[in-house]
Amino acid sequence: MRVLVTAASKHGATAEIAEAVAKGLADRGVVAEVTALEGVRSLAGYDAVVLGSGVYVGHWLPAAKAFVARLHAELVARPVWVFSSGPLGDPPMPRDVVDVGDLLRWCGAREHRVFAGRLDRHALGFAERAIVHAVHAPEGDFRDWGAIDAWAGEIAEALVGGGSDE
Ligand SMILES: Cc1cc2nc3c(=O)[nH]c(=O)nc-3n(C[C@H](O)[C@H](O)[C@H](O)COP(=O)(O)O)c2cc1C
């Protein structure tokens, strides 16, 4: 059982979630490989995929959408789990605003999970700063590592605990 974990990330927060998911899988005996989206040309050799993206103005990053378009035929042939990272604050807001319904149906994802994200104003460009200022987005790291690890546990259980149809 070999799982690809990959994510589109503009400022690194979502990439670190992908790494945590891979570690959570590995801790439970599932071989997991973290690779940059752009470097994946084929899913040959992977039994399952965990795909994520940071959320920007209600949408996934273009690299994640392109990944689904490029590898669609291979994605539908495997179990796929999907996550989005974006909501900020305590409690994290906004919830459930990412518009990925069609994408998820298209790649036959088993589940879509939304995780809180991280915002560091200093890392942003001018336009991004203007947007977060306009919506009063709170600065900070709101990622819930416990929830992320628990999700990795659920995926591992589905894959090796009899929940997989592979
Ligand atoms: C310009 C901008 C727009 C954002 N829009 C959203 C949004 O619509 N919904 C959301 O949940 N998070 C939004 N966020 C928060 C990011 O998704 C969050 O900071 C995420 O952790 C960034 O991930 P990354 O570091 O992997 O790029 C936005 C952040 C910025 C800077």
Image (cartoon, grey):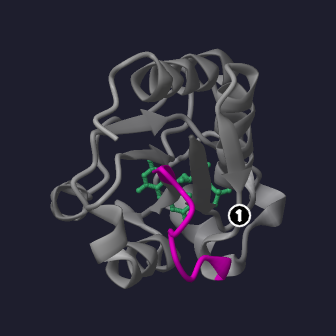
- Tell me which segment is drawn in magenta: 39-51
| Label 1 beta carbon less than 8 Å to ligand 1 | no
Q: Can residue 94 be seen here?
A: no
Location of the C terminus by quadrant is top left
Hey, which quadrant is residue 144 in on the image? top right
Give the residue type at disc 1: Thr
Location of the N terminus by quadrant is top right
Image quarter for ligand 1: bottom right
Give residue 110's position: percent from left, percent from top: 27, 40
Q: Is residue 25 above or below residue 124?
A: above
Q: Is residue 139 above or below residue 23?
A: below
Give residue 78's position: percent from left, percent from top: 35, 54
Q: Residue at x 33, y 22 (%)?
A: 163
In terms of secondary structure, what is the magenta stretch mainly?
loop
Q: Can residue 11 be seen here?
A: yes
Q: Residue at x 60, y 72 (%)?
A: 37
Label 1, on which residue? 35
